[in-house]
Image (cartoon, helix red, strand yellow):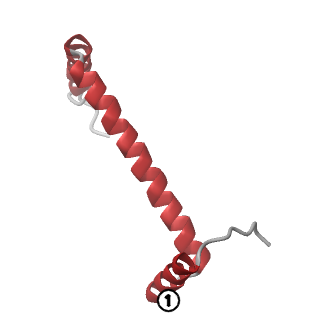
Amino acid sequence: MGIQVRVNESTHAAIRSLANEAGDSMQSIIDKAISHYRRELFLESLNQDFKRLRSDSEDWNVELEERKLWENTLLDGDDK
């Protein structure tokens, strides 16, 4: 048996409702919600990192130059 986590009644009802609606288990709904939240946090952090990078014109220019180098690799003739 897995580890138990306490949630309030409204959260439990919401999980149960989503599980019934999706035809899925409550555990699966929780797993998917955590996965979605983890992705959301990652993307928010990435967005903040790019904002910081763009705020420094010197670093941003280095980034743009590096992107140009990567774009050239797309034209290397390898069609695989």
Q: Position of residue 5 (x, y in %)?
A: 69, 67
The outermost residue toward the top is 58
- Residue drawn at (50%, 89%), measured in percent from left and top? 20
Query: How many numbered discs?
Result: 1
Residue ID at (23%, 29%)? 77
Dot 1 crowding, Cα within 10 Å, few <14, some 14–19, many 20+: few
| Residue 25 rendering spot, x and y as whole percentages | 58, 81
Nearer to me, 25 or 77: 25
Q: Is residue 40 left or right of residue 69?
A: right
Quadrant hosting residue 58: top left
Q: Residue at x 25, y 14 (%)?
A: 62
Q: Quadrant of residue 64?
A: top left
Using the image, determine if residue 23 lies above or below residue 61.
below
- Image position, residue 78 (x, y; %): 28, 32
Q: Name, please, the residue furthest toward the right.
A: 1
- Residue 56 image-quadrant placement: top left
> Which quadrant is home to the C terminus?
top left
**Which residue is under mark 1?**
20
